[in-house]
Amino acid sequence: MRRLILPAVLAAALALTGCDSAEPAPPAAGPGADVETDLDVPADGAGTEAQISELIGQSMVDDGNCSFGDGKGVAALSVTTASQLAGETTYDYQRQQAEQTYQTVTDLDGDGKGYLAVKDIGAEAVLVGGAGSFTVTLSSFERLGAQPDGYEQALRRLLDALPR
């Protein structure tokens, strides 16, 4: 049951902290055109820090605009959202850049498309599906970098909490 509730809660929490796309969805171009919907919830980030902290396994502070830090100016988490169309449009380029920047890049299984990229001091994941497009980045988490799969495990928990 928690796997069903957490995505809805995190999606609402991310929208509440301003993670929804700043651009409105483009109008449909004609019959059969994809209709894109971005999260659109009033801004009020109550409880988001606790949810993100639980998923990361470290206390996090909401820095606004869907960015979270460790409160010391070192570790950072950011989530960028966009429409499914926008995510599809930029996906190949983002993945190509990840292959040049990160040590490992792994395709994600499941609905939609995505990848998870990891290096010793950071990680990035991109998920494109029916609920939209999400880019999640983590950087400079000492505890995550000290564990063999720390960044990957943290990103997978975050991705599991996102709607698909």
Image: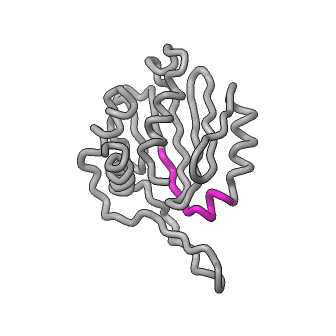
Q: In front: 23, or 74? A: 23
Q: Is residue 135 above or below residue 145?
A: below
Q: Give the x, y percent position of residue 60.
A: 34, 33
* Residue 152 versus residue 7 in the image, above or below: above
Total marks shown come to 0
**Residue 130 is covered by the magenta coloring:** no
Q: Position of residue 85 (x, y in %)?
A: 62, 64
Image quarter of residue 50: top left
Residue 35 placement, left or right of 101? left
Residue 104 occupies which quadrant of the picture?
Answer: top right
Q: Give the answer, above or below, for where 130 lies relative to 147.
A: below
Residue stretch rendered in magenta on the structure: 79-88
Residue located at (62% from left, 46% from top): 114
Q: What residue sits 42% from the left and 63% below the top?
A: 39
Residue 154 percent location from the top left of the image:
46, 30
Which residue corresponds to the image point at 48% horizontal and 63% vertical from the top-left? 22
Residue ranking furthest to the bottom: 30
